[in-house]
Image: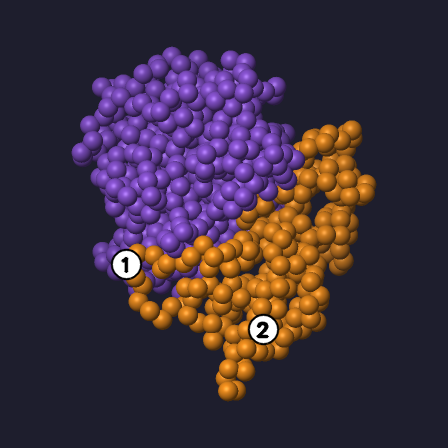
């Protein structure tokens, strides 16, 4: 990673405690820069050395647990895998760290994901089979496995949900993640509940609420094309309806 | 007061598996976790999970017995062999169950679960989902808890275990979001709180792995076992110690020093890069210490000969990590790596049912020591331990609640919980109001640096004694710390420094156990006692907390079929 010839980086971070603050504010901190520093490192510096009241989520610090999705310099990113140097290379001169937009703030960068989790649960995101479990594994060819590969990489960080205009405006919409995960089960060769899953998703609360804006796909830190999965759901919903009509 | 028949603390693989089992046994169950379950450290496991399925063409005659032997030899004969036999014989059942639950394992050409070679294993028996196996397993397990509608208390941190007269009554926990301290009574409590990697510097572990569950149990009088055995993973990314899976070597990756040599031929001529982790990590550190590493202190993990296709298919996540954090694309360039603290073989002392010496209190996963890993764990056996012993602990906790435990425990419940809540309230307020001169962030940094340097890959009496003295000093300084923030809601300053005390106490148990064990065994390597000494030390270390720190006792190792032999690879 290229070295940066700077000693400090200016961090502007969103602060809001809905129980005590009438409005949000932006705090500015100049944080000592070290090579390889990530946005999460900068937040920890603030917490440990400057202001112990800062709240944020964290866990794995390697981009796999999904805890630290934030809105950083105008993009959805995981704070832990976002190098300060990369943000600067994009032409920014300071770090702007905001909570995931359009979600209620619990405190500072910690958002309330309740609706995201409820919607995820609402699609019954577990395998449903109609045959007895075999003694060994259910066979699945590498080609069949490949169909779900992109979608099982989801880390449930909430970026897509936060980025989706249909989520902002339609309280009923289950959101891109729930739709993508529905598709993940519909195309899994081992799952037998495609009809029910399409029934749950093929309505105005589901896939048809997606207006193919692609925000979710752009927001996804794991580069999952959720919009394409939702389009797949629409195609299958129509195909199932046509089959039903015959 | 909140009450659950079975309360599981920890939402990783062991905790969720225990919760599912207790639920399916007819108990009312809740999980309490300091993060949302999918953020638990299990999610970061990469390379795989072992089971003698025999799916690989070179593993036709693999068996649970061979898996057991490899595990026992890998443990340097410190594992309890009856427990290892449970681990390896239950392994295929547990893996097939995860597959039936929808886990997206990678597949062989004929559609079976794919398996790859791993260190210290006689056959390719490590099942995998690319290099995101922990993620695949944890998400699948979470789906199953959703299906069962098991309640999860998210972002609650356990502060105390309620124990009286040798019986467990529940926990007292801090609800991070409100800052309220809550008593949670339970018929049985299962700890599945993970390891304590962050007690060490240079750790591969996630930031929340502070050993807090071990510490809470230890402070409630439950002994810890074999704490001196700390695994250092051979290949963590130079600079920030993010894990670079052993699967990279399983897929054929080489280790090279600055001279370009595949130096493992000097240390493990047969197994080469697939020697067990203790041997490989020491080999790397020896190369670095003797001047054959790269400036700054690292060697290369070279995957360039594997080709883009294999790397993209089998190792996509570590490729992303290497690119993100170091700018190195492993397809074209070798990855700079160094050993990093990785795993606690020791933990809360349990038997092979997950039970501790406190009635109604169970433990499973990395926070527990059954012991199946002994002095050195084989790669692919920790994920396996979580689901095998999570399930077993869940079943036994449920049996306890339905049998002798349930009603008897409830009779004194309110009184015990009120007492423990009161004591815990005093303790957490003392921390919240702490306004001394010591900076707790410095204490934590000093602790981590001290442990890696003095009770690390290579150990000796003098250095460890100095390390233990330093830990004592930190213990003295801890009450003189000052917090920066005194609000109760989502106060990370409070929550993190509350558990710093436990980190120090667990560090003390590690260092004391290591000092007392005057031999080298598995991960515990002493330059002033380089040989294994079965005569004196084929035994488990048991540490109990007293007013003056840990009191050590010893307990024999269970040997069933495999007599200790010299360990070569």
Instruction: Write the residue at 62% across / 59% down.
Output: A225
Instruction: Write the residue at 38% across / 45% down.
Output: B115
Instruction: Write the residue at 64% across / 55% down.
Output: A220
Figure coloring: by chain
Q: Nearer the viewer, residue A71 or B163?
A: A71
Q: Confirm whether residue B354 shows in the render.
A: no
Instruction: Write the residue at 61% across / 34% down.
Output: B332
Label 2 packing within 10 angstroms: few (<14), some (14-19), many (20+): some
Residue B511 on image: x %, y %: 42, 24
Q: Colour of chain A?
A: orange
Element type where label 1 sits in the image: loop
Name the disc covering residue A135, or none.
Answer: 1
When asked about the image quadrant of residue A138, the answer is bottom left
Q: Nearer the viewer, residue B66 or A49?
A: B66
User: Which residue is the extreme one toward the left?
Assistant: B561
Element type where label 2 sits in the image: helix
Q: Assign the N terminus of chain B to one quadrant of the image.
A: bottom left
Q: Is residue B315 left or right of residue A136?
A: right
Q: Nearer the viewer, residue A53 or B284?
A: B284
Residue A115 on image: x %, y %: 59, 66
Count of residue discs: 2
Callout 2: residue from which chain?
A: A
Q: Assign the C terminus of chain B to one quadrant of the image.
A: top left
Residue hosting label 2: A235
Separation of residues labelled 1 and 2 (CA atoms): 35 Å
Q: Is residue B319 left or right of residue B502?
A: right
Q: Colour of chain B?
A: purple
Where B451 sits versus B52, above or below? above
Q: Confirm whether residue B533 shows in the render.
A: yes
């Amino acid at each position: 990673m290229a070295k940066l010839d700077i000693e400090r980086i200016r961090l502007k971070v969103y602060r809001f405690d809905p129980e005590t603050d009438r409005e949000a504010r932006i705090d500015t901190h100049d944080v000592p820069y070290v090579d390889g520093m990530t946005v999460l490192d900068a937040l920890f510096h603030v917490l440990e050395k400057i202001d112990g009241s800062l709240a944020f989520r964290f866990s794995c610090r390697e981009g796999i647990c999904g805890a630290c999705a934030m809105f950083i310099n105008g993009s959805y990113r995981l704070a832990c895998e976002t190098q300060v140097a990369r943000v600067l290379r994009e032409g920014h001169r300071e770090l702007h760290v905001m909570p995931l937009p359009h979600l209620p703030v619990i405190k500072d960068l910690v958002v309330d994901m309740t609706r995201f989790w409820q919607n995820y649960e609402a699609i019954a995101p577990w395998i449903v089979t109609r045959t007895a479990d075999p003694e060994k594994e259910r066979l699945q060819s590498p080609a069949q496995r490949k169909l779900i590969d992109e979608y099982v990489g989801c880390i449930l960080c909430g970026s897509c949900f936060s980025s989706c205009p249909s989520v902002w405006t339609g309280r009923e919409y289950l959101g891109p993640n729930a739709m993508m995960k529905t598709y993940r089960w519909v195309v899994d060769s081992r799952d037998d509940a495609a009809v029910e899953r399409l029934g749950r998703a093929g309505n105005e609360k589901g896939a048809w609420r997606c207006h193919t804006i692609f925000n979710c796909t752009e927001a996804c830190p794991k580069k999952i094309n959720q919009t394409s999965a939702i389009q797949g759901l629409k195609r299958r919903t129509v195909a199932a309806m046509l089959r039903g009509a015959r | 007061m909140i009450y659950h028949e079975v309360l599981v603390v920890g939402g990783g693989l062991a905790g969720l598996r225990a919760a599912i089992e207790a639920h399916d046994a007819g108990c009312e169950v809740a999980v309490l976790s300091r993060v949302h379950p999918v953020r638990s450290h299990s999610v970061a496991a990469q390379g795989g999970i072992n089971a003698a399925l025999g799916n690989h063409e070179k593993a036709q005659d693999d068996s649970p017995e061979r898996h057991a032997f490899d595990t026992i030899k890998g443990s340097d004969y410190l594992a309890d062999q009856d427990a290892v036999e449970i681990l390896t014989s239950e392994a295929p059942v547990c893996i097939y169950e995860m597959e039936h639950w929808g886990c997206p394992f990678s597949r062989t050409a004929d559609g079976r679960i794919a398996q790859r070679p791993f260190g210290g294993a006689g056959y390719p028996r490590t099942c995998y989902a690319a290099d995101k196996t922990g993620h695949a397993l944890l998400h699948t397990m979470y789906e199953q808890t959703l299906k069962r509608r098991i309640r999860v208390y998210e972002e609650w941190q356990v502060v105390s275990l309620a124990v009286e007269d040798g019986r467990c009554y529940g926990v007292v926990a801090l609800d991070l979001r409100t800052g309220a301290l809550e008593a949670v009574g339970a018929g049985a409590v299962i700890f599945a709180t993970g390891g304590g990697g962050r007690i060490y510097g240079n750790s591969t572990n996630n930031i929340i792995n502070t050993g807090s569950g071990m510490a809470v149990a230890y402070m409630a009088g439950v002994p810890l076992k074999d704490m001196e055995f700390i695994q250092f993973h051979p290949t963590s990314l130079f600079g920030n110690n993010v894990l670079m899976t052993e699967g990279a070597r399983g897929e054929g990756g080489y280790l090279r020093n600055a001279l370009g040599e595949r130096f493992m031929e000097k240390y493990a001529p047969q197994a080469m890069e697939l020697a067990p982790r203790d041997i490989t990590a020491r080999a790397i550190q020896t190369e670095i210490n003797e001047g054959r590493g790269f400036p700054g202190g690292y060697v290369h993990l070279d995957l360039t000969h594997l080709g883009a296709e294999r790397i993209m298919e089998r190792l996509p996540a570590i490729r992303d990590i290497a690119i993100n954090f170091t700018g190195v694309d492993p397809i074209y360039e070798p990855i700079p790596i160094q050993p990093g603290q990785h795993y606690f073989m020791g933990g809360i002392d349990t038997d092979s049912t997950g039970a501790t010496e406190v009635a109604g209190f169970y433990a499973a996963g990395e926070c527990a020591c059954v012991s199946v890993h002994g002095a050195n764990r084989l790669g692919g056996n920790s994920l396996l331990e979580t689901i095998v012993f999570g399930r077993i602990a869940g079943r036994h906790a449920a049996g306890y609640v339905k049998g002798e435990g349930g009603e008897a425990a409830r009779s004194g419940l309110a009184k015990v919980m009120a007492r423990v809540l009161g004591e815990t309230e005093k303790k957490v307020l003392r921390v919240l109001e702490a306004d001394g001169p010591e900076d707790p962030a410095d204490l934590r940094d000093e602790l981590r640096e001290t442990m890696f340097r003095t009770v690390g890959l290579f150990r000796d009496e003098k250095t460890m004694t100095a390390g233990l003295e330093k830990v004592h000093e930190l213990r003295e300084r801890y009450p003189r710390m000052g917090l920066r923030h005194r609000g109760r809601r989502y106060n990370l300053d409070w929550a993190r420094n509350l558990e710093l005390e436990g980190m120090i106490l667990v560090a003390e148990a590690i260092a004391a156990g290591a000092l007392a064990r005057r031999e080298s065994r598995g991960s515990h390597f002493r330059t002033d006692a380089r040989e294994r000494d079965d005569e004196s030390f084929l035994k488990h270390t048991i540490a109990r907390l007293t007013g003056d720190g840990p009191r050590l006792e010893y307990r024999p190792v269970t040997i069933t079929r495999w007599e200790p032999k010299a360990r070569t690879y």
